[in-house]
Amino acid sequence: MTTKTGSSFNATGRRKNAVAHVRMTEGTGKIVINDCPFEEYLPTEQLQNEILRPFHAVNMINKFDVKINAAGGGIHGQAGAIRHGISRALTQLDPELRKTLKPLDLLRRDPRMKERKKPGQPGARKRFQFSKR
């Protein structure tokens, strides 16, 4: 879901069970996730770089303030959902950016989900131990 309101751009990103609602406004590059600076919310540099990847791809670092509400899943799923939401908001800003972001798979929702547990088994694929005698 993407919407444009005034000078802010709203988009929703998803990955696994995580959902991120992204609101971008022109500013100085401040990123806030669930009312917490993103450096504190995402402890590793790898996750921080994953969120900044769409901005690096289109050379728009420190040009937007981003406010994010992330829910569900774990920290890695939320980071992927945030990246997806930021990419969708950037394409809203300028449809020409789609040509840059799409080949990098930044606009593609990662469809991989956890496989469900089957009845009569301890897990999704695991079987109970077989005893011949």
Image: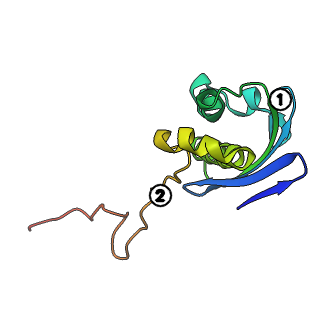
- On the rendered image, what quadrant is the C terminus found in? bottom left
Measured as percent of width and height from the top left, residue 37 is found at: 81, 31
* Figure disc tally: 2
Looking at the image, is mark 1 or mark 2 earlier in the sequence? 1
Instruction: Name the residue carrying label 2.
Output: 111
What amino acid does circle 2 point to? Pro
At x 27%, y 64%, the residue is 127
At x 70%, y 43%, the residue is 90
Which residue ends up furthest to the front in the rendered image? 96
Disc 1, disc 2: CB below 8 Å? no
At x 83%, y 29%, the residue is 30
What amino acid does circle 1 point to? Lys
Please, is residue 65 above or below residue 2 in the view?
above
Q: Which mark is residue 30?
A: 1
10 Å crowding of disc 1: few (<14), some (14-19), many (20+): some
10 Å crowding of disc 2: few (<14), some (14-19), many (20+): few
Measured as percent of width and height from the top left, residue 41 is found at: 73, 34
- Judging from the image, what secondary structure is the residue with disc 2 in? loop
